[in-house]
Amino acid sequence: MKKLGILNRDIARVLASLGHTDQIVISDCGLPIPSNVECIDLSIRLGVPNFVDVLTEVLADMEVELMMAATEVRTESPSIHQELENRQISIRYLPHDELKAETSKAKAIIRTGECAPYANVILRAGVIF
C-alpha cells in the first residue's frame, strides 16, 4: 500500500506518466470536460473536495513550471486568485473561453466539487533536474 503522496490511483498514475510540458487540469465542478480528455472525478457534493485542497496535494507531488488560469478569476474569485498567486509559480492568465479550449490538450482533468467561479487551473509539467 502506498504510504506517502497522492493515494488516488488515477491521479498517481497520471502524475507518474507526465513528461516535460505535459498538462493536467484541476477544475471546479462546472468546467466542461472535452470528450478526448480523461476525467478523474473527485466531486462528492458542492464544495467537496475543494479546489485549494486538491491543488495543494497535486503541487506537492508534481513539478510545475507554469500555471494557466482564467483572467476572470482575479475579479470573480479573489480568494482562489490569491491561492494561485501564493504558490510562487509563474501564472499565465487568458480569457476563460481560451482556457476551456486549452483543456483539450490536457492528459487529464481532475474535477473537484468546487463551486467558486473560475476555479480552474492548467498545470504544465516541469522537470526535476
Image: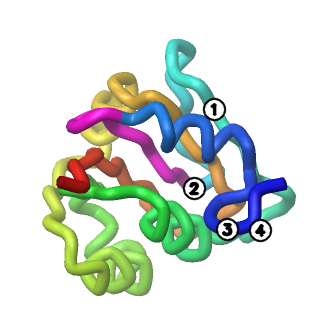
Assess whether mark 1 and mark 4 are in contact (beta carbons under 8 angstroms). Answer: no
Which of pointers 3 and 4 indicates the residue nearer the eye?
3
How far, Cα to Cα, is label 3 from label 2? 25 Å
Helix, strand or loop for disc 1: strand
Helix, strand or loop for disc 4: loop
Assess whether mark 2 and mark 3 are in contact (beta carbons under 8 angstroms). Answer: no
Q: Amino acid at mark 2?
A: Asp
How far, Cα to Cα, is label 1 from label 2? 12 Å
Helix, strand or loop for disc 3: loop
Residue topped by disc 3? 4
Label 3 vs 4, first from the N-terminus: 3
Residue 29 % position (x, y)? 65, 51
Asked whether residue 115 is in view, the answer is no
Q: Residues within 10 Å of mark 3 (few under 14, many from 20)?
A: few
Which of pointers 1 and 2 indicates the residue nearer the eye?
1
Q: Which is nearer the eye, 118 or 124?
A: 124
Q: Amino acid at mark 3?
A: Leu
Q: Residues within 10 Å of mark 1 (few under 14, many from 20)?
A: some
Relative placement, left or right, of 100 versus 65 is right
The circle on residue 39 is: 1
Label 3 vs 2, first from the N-terminus: 3
The stretch in magenta equals: 19-27
Label 2 vs 4, first from the N-terminus: 2
Helix, strand or loop for disc 2: loop
The circle on residue 48 is: 4
Which residue is depicted at the point 22% across and 49% down? 127
Relative placement, left or right, of 111 versus 84 is right
Residue topped by disc 2? 28
